[in-house]
């Protein structure tokens, strides 16, 4: 979900693992030479989701990375399958109060451009949760945990998958 810490935790994990961090939304914006809100406004969500899938597939075909996808990317079965085939999905599970605290002052969230953005966020989280629960790995949010503390917990969860994370011998 937006506000779960995908970018911050992803960057911290990538640094610890010595691999690049890639944000699929940033890659989409770079390829389109437009912001996500501009793409949504100009071309619609369906067009955006198709471009998002193409970018995710391209990034997953490259060398190992920590890939942060937009909150809606994992909803598409094609993206879930591609992520599972190339690596592992990790869900940063944060409650609505935490998510709202993190996103309420940020612009550039087209899905929250509604009359009641907090309610919209809660509805999005409730609708998406069953799909997010399909992720192979889950890192529960801990109130007031730092980025480094959460990255440490995420790394511990990631280490539970030796088929994904190589350990030095």
Image (cartoon, rainbow, N blue to C red):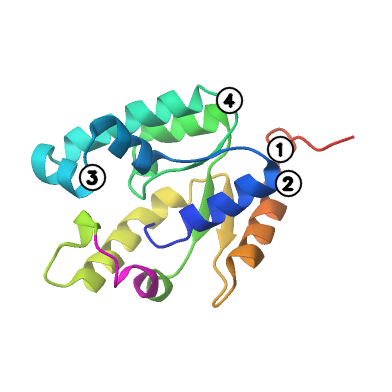
Q: Which residue is mark 1?
A: 165
* Label 4 CA crowd tier, 10 Å (few <14, some 14–19, many 20+): few
Give neighbour class at mark 1: few <14, some 14-19, many 20+ (Cα, 10 Å).
some
Q: Is 168 placed left or right of 155 in the picture?
A: right
**Measured along the vertical axis of the image, is residue 47 above or below residue 146?**
above
Contact, mark 2 vs mark 1 (Cβ under 8 Å): yes
Closest to the camera, between mark 3 and mark 2, is 3
Q: State which tag comes first along the sequence, 4 or 2.
A: 4
Mark nearer the N terminus (2 vs 1): 2
Tell me the element at label 3. loop
Count neighbours of disc 2 (C-alpha within 10 A) and say few if under 14, some if 14 to 19, many if 20 or more: some
Circle 4 or circle 3, nearest the eye:
3
Badge 2 is on which residue? 159
Q: Nearer the viewer, mark 4 or mark 2?
A: 4
- Check contact, mark 4 vs mark 2: CB within 8 A: no
Quadrant (top left, top right, bottom left, bottom right) of the N terminus: bottom left
Front position among marks 3 and 1: 3
The residues bearing labels 4 and 1 have C-alpha atoms spaced at a distance of 14 Å
Instruction: Please give the name of the residue rendered at 60% of the width and 54% of the height, measured from the top-left corner.
Output: 12
Crowding around mark 3 (Cα neighbors within 10 Å: few <14, some 14 to 19, many 20+) is some
Give the SS element for disc 1: loop
In the image, is residue 125 above or below residue 134? below
Say which element carries label 4: loop
Which residue is disc 4 drawn over?
63
Using the rendered view, name the quadrant where residue 32 is placed: top left
The mark nearer the N terminus, 3 or 2, is: 3
The span picked out in magenta is 100-107
Reading the image, the residue beneath label 3 is 35
Sequence-earlier tag: 4 or 1: 4
Q: Where does residue 114 sit, x and y in percent of width and height?
A: 13, 65
């Amino acid at each position: 979900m937006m506000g779960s810490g995908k970018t911050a935790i992803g960057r911290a994990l990538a640094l610890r693992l010595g691999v690049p961090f890639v944000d699929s939304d940033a890659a989409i914006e770079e390829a389109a030479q437009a912001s996500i809100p501009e793409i949504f406004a100009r071309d619609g969500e369906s067009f955006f989701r198709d471009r998002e899938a193409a970018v995710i597939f391209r990034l997953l075909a490259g060398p190992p990375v920590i890939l942060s996808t937009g909150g809606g990317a994992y909803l598409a079965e094609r993206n879930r399958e591609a992520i599972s085939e190339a690596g592992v999905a990790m869900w940063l599970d944060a409650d609505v109060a935490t998510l709202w605290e993190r996103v309420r002052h940020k612009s550039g969230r087209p899905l929250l451009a509604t009359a009641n953005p907090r309610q919209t966020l809660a509805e999005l989280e409730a609708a998406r949760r069953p799909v997010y629960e399909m992720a192979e790995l889950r890192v529960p949010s801990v109130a007031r945990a730092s980025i480094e503390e959460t990255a440490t917990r995420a790394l511990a969860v990631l280490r539970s998958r030796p088929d994904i994370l190589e350990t030095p011998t």
